[in-house]
Image: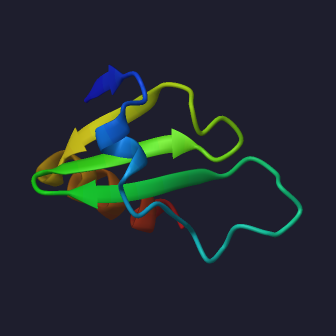
Amino acid sequence: MKIEACTEATEALAWSKSSYSGGEGGECVEVAASPGTIHVRDSKDKQGPQLSFTAAEWAAFVSYARKLG
């Protein structure tokens, strides 16, 4: 995982929120995929820092999160 600043390259990504996110604007994250990298940002701070994961790191996180759910 790495933390990076918002750049023009990541602004052009197709960001999406989980279908579980409500419309009231609570604590939500947005995710976007680019070749080999998954980007995650705070939906309330779109210009703020972003986390970047490799596809393998993201798959491991999603697998673990499913086990908790």
Q: Quadrant of residue 31?
A: bottom left
Q: Quadrant of the C terminus?
A: bottom right
Q: Is residue 58 left or right of residue 30?
A: left
Q: Position of residue 41 (x, y in %)?
A: 51, 41
Q: Is residue 64 visible?
A: no
Q: Is residue 57 above or below residue 13?
A: above
Q: Quadrant of the N terminus?
A: top left
Q: Quadrant of residue 62?
A: bottom left
Residue name at image x 61 percent, y 77 percent: 19
Q: Is residue 46 left or right of residue 5?
A: right
Residue found at the far right of this picture: 24
Q: Position of residue 14 (x, y in %)?
A: 40, 64
Toward the viewer: 37 or 65? 37
Q: Is residue 22 left or right of residue 43?
A: right
Residue name at image x 74 percent, y 47 percent: 27
Q: Position of residue 3 (x, y in %)?
A: 35, 22
